[in-house]
Image (cartoon, helix red, strand yellow):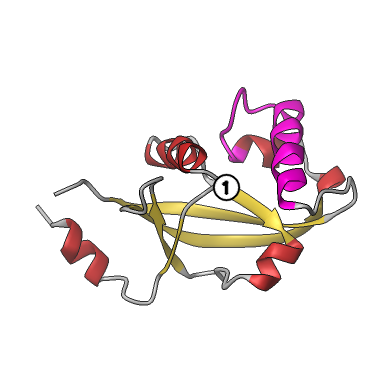
Amino acid sequence: MTSKQNILEQYPDALRWAFGDSPQLADELLQLVIVGEKTATCSSYVAYRQEKAPLVGDYSVILDGRGEARCVIRTRALLLIRFCDVSAELAAKEGEGDKSLACWRRGHQAFFTREGTFAPDMWLVFEEFERVAVLEGE
């Protein structure tokens, strides 16, 4: 069995980040990735430009709400799309709530409002990814 440290050593240049804007949300969304329900995420275009964000092919180490490395993902595709144009298919890939477009819109409108960027026609960077490894605690 490969240890957590050995797996992390395979991705020394990977970005390290957590989903969401709170420890609780980070843990909830991380769990969806671990069980295979969440295969996508999105960010406001403004935030994507401000942060060091992944490009297609990049690896990311996803952190839990305590800042501990829990899994590795790889970005497969990036899509620039307006909030109002996100489809039910794209929303379902985020794996949240009941996976409906209505649920996605409610949750993401609240998130982007907290971020201070929400507008119905705002630009999003939608990222599709694959889970590469799940890291167990040691």
Look at 43% across and 63% down and name the residue there.
60
Residue type marked 1: Asp
Residue drawn at x 69%, y 26% is 100
| Residue found at the far left of this picture | 1
Residue 89 image offset from top left, x and y in percent: 69, 37
Single out the residue that lies furthest toward the bottom.
13
Q: Secondary structure at mark 1?
A: loop
Residue topped by disc 1: 21
Q: Main secondary structure of the magenta part?
A: helix
Seen in the image, is 74 located left or right of residue 79?
left
Quarter location, residue 109: top right
| Quadrant in the rendering for residue 77 | bottom right
Compared to 80, does 13 lie above or below? Answer: below
Give the residue drawn at x 13%, y 49%.
138
In the image, is residue 78 part of the stretch drawn in magenta? no
Percent from the top left, x then y, of residue 132? Answer: 35, 55
Q: Assess disc 1: are there few (<14), some (14-19) or many (≥20) residues with their C-alpha within 10 Å of its C-alpha.
A: few
Residue 18: percent from left, percent from top = 47, 53
Is 48 situated left or right of 3 in this image? right
Locate residue 80 relative to residue 57 in the image: left or right.
right
Asked if the stretch drawn in magenta spans residue 99, the answer is: yes
In the orientation shown, which residue stands out farthest toward the top?
98
Instruction: Identify which residue is drawn at 74% across, 47% down.
Output: 112
> Which region shows up in magenta?
93-115
